[in-house]
């Protein structure tokens, strides 16, 4: 027997007279229980209204543009009266306790909200299986994976565009500008090979517009993926009210309370600052300010000789600025082996105005004509005036400031949130991923952690167990490394041997005029199993992936050295290094030991 039932807008919290922006079904459509019927939008959020029953749409009672509140009639649905009684019920998954101290234990199936959690959620504007706090690479990956696994997901982002720091003011725009820099420097340096171009005409406005277009395409793509997966995006600053409720404050002051069964914290990191600098002076920039490309300063001081500082130094050098770098350590990019940094250091010492190591900026004084820098340290240059100063001394996690204590989530003194191998915090239903849960602060680490968290919530038996996380400096030349470094091996007393292939012996490297690079493999002396690798040279970041896979697969030198690589390519260089380890290389002469 078929019944016709009225489907009405359910309790949607404090929302009244909100707009219907999308009707997702039409008369004659067959719908399942929980199929989305309409999408509504208020000044606080966008949400979809699901069907409470299965059946066939008999008649629609509203259209796009109508305003609805609780109780508004949506449609008439023809249902089979006893369908629910006849439908087979899915088997219940066995409940298994999961603890932070035992991440490899079986994970329980997601449970319904406990009575205490339901009490906390009273008066919530929205309810979700999973709330994701932050929409960077880790956050949107977590949201999308959870949605793909059948979860109702709310993604909270403080800014108008999705993608976080990486997409908007980090990885992506910096790589766009680094490509511009590479084109300029290649054209300039090829004059020595018989092809000379005139001095480039730099249109800073067009470069900026192109960079912004690259970013916009990425953020719009992420927004489209969210919509396709029916992920509810809520804009505003999110913070915990309790262990099961997040409050989101929009720019206009409106608040939205969201109740959740699980939460994934993906709040990322922020630029670190040094005390005592004139931050109210716009001529002092962080990496975000540098990417805005307001102008090309005549003289630029970069405080910090790490990856971010040197990447931006590459950009501004190519665009015509005279660049000075100051680093308090005894070498650039302290995390990498010194032999990998040497070709980079040699190149930039020729191009830049100065590179000061074992030195730091003691004071920056604003002057009408620029910022006056006073230095101190083993190397103590005279005071100098700079048109702009870029501060690039690292990043700090955003664990503080989200009300984590109100949810009972532990945050350490530095702002990191400790997690287990399934990305759980000390509160079992709350997870953390990406920069906020520990070093290294890299997008590709965050995305893998994101999938672990989402899959754990869905009941999968997974853990984050990567053998290595590669690092890349997109400088010129690029520097990339993974696995064990020589510095670490010596410090930890780990036995190793190495094979380092000079790119001067690579036909491809010579043919593009960039033979200064090298590819180094570290391996276990007896088994010849790969332990780590480092590459310096053009496109090193693209080349390191093969060696990451080799390490994950437990490859040895024969596995790499007996794999046929295309010739002539830079991808041959790991192959040649492996042949050196095997003693079979013919592209170099190695005296017999």
Image: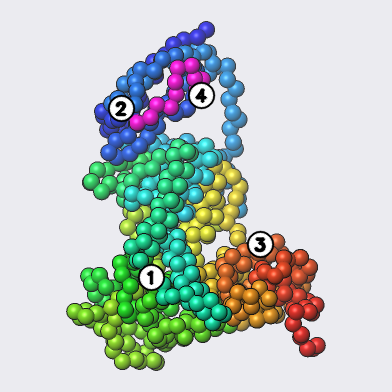
Q: For mark 1, does the 10 Å Cα neighbourhood hold few (<14), some (14 to 19), or many (20 or more) residues?
A: few
Viewer can see residue 392: yes
Circle on res. 201? 1
* Residue that label 2 marks: 65
Q: CA distance from mark 3 to mark 2?
A: 53 Å
In magenta stretch: residue 233:
no
**Residue farthest top in this picture:** 1
Q: Secondary structure at mark 1?
A: loop
Q: CA distance from mark 4 to mark 3?
A: 43 Å
* Above or below, 243 relative to 118: below
* Residue that label 3 marks: 549
Residue ID at (72%, 68%) = 567
In the rendered structure, are the residues bearing label 4 and label 2 in contact, judged by CB atoms less than 8 Å apart?
no
Q: CA distance from mark 4 to mark 2?
A: 25 Å
Q: Earlier in the sequence, mark 3 or mark 1?
A: 1
Q: In the image shown, does 570 or 333 lie closer to the viewer?
A: 570
Q: Quadrant of residue 278?
A: bottom left
* Residue that label 4 marks: 32
Residue ID at (31%, 79%) = 298
């Amino acid at each position: 027997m078929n019944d016709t039932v009225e489907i009405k807008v359910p309790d949607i919290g404090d929302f009244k007279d909100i707009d219907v922006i999308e009707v997702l079904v039409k008369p004659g459509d067959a719908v399942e229980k929980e199929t989305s019927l309409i999408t509504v939008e208020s000044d606080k959020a966008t949400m979809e209204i699901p069907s409470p029953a299965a059946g066939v749409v008999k008649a629609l009672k509203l259209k796009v543009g109508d305003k609805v509140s609780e109780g508004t009639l949506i449609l008439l649905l023809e249902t089979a009266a006893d369908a629910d009684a006849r439908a087979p019920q899915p088997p219940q998954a066995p409940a298994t306790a999961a603890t932070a101290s035992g991440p490899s234990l079986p994970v329980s199936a997601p449970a319904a909200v406990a009575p205490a959690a339901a009490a906390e959620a009273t008066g919530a504007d929205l309810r979700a299986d999973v709330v994701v706090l932050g929409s960077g690479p880790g956050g949107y990956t977590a949201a999308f994976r959870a949605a793909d696994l059948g979860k109702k997901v709310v993604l909270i982002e403080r800014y108008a565009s999705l993608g976080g720091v990486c997409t908007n003011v980090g990885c992506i725009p910096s790589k766009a500008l680094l490509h511009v820099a590479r084109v300029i420097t290649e054209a300039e340096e090829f004059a020595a090979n018989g092809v000379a171009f005139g001095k480039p005409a730099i249109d800073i406005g067009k470069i900026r517009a192109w960079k912004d277009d690259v970013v916009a395409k990425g953020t719009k793509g992420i927004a489209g993926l969210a919509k396709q997966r029916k992920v509810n995006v809520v804009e505003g600053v999110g913070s915990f009210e309790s262990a099961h409720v997040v409050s989101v404050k929009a720019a206009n002051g409106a608040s939205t309370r969201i109740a959740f069964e699980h939460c994934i914290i993906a709040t990322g990191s922020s630029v670190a600052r040094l005390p005592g600098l004139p931050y109210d002076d716009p001529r002092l920039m962080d990496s975000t300010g540098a990417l805005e490309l307001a102008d090309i300063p005549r003289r630029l001081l970069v405080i910090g000789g790490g990856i971010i500082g040197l990447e931006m130094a590459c950009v501004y050098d190519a665009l015509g600025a005279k660049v000075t770098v100051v680093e308090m350590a005894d070498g650039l990019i302290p995390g990498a082996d010194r032999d990998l940094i040497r070709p980079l250091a040699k190149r930039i010492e020729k191009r830049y105005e100065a590179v000061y190591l074992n030195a730091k900026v003691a004071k920056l004084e604003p002057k009408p004509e620029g910022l006056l820098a006073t230095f101190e340290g083993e190397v103590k240059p005279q005071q100098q005036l700079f048109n702009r100063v870029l501060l690039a001394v690292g990043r700090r996690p955003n664990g503080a400031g989200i009300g984590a204590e109100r949810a009972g989530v532990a945050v350490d003194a530095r702002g990191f949130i400790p997690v287990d191998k399934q990305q759980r915090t000390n509160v079992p239903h709350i997870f953390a991923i990406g920069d906020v849960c520990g070093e290294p602060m890299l997008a590709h680490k965050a995305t893998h952690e994101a999938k672990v968290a989402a899959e754990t919530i869905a009941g999968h038996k997974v853990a984050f167990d990567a053998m290595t996380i590669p690092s890349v400096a997109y400088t010129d030349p690029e520097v990339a490394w993974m696995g064990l470094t020589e510095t670490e091996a010596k410090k930890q007393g780990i036995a190793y041997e190495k094979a380092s292939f000079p790119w001067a012996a690579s036909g491809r490297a010579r043919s593009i005029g960039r033979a200064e690079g090298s590819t180094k493999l570290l391996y276990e002396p007896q088994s010849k199993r790969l332990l780590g690798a480092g590459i310096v040279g053009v496109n090193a970041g693209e080349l390191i992936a093969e060696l990451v896979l080799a390490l994950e697969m437990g490859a040895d030198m024969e596995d790499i050295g007996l794999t046929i690589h295309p010739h002539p390519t830079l991808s041959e260089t790991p192959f040649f290094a492996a042949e050196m380890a095997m003693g079979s290389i013919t592209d170099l002469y190695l005296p017999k030991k």
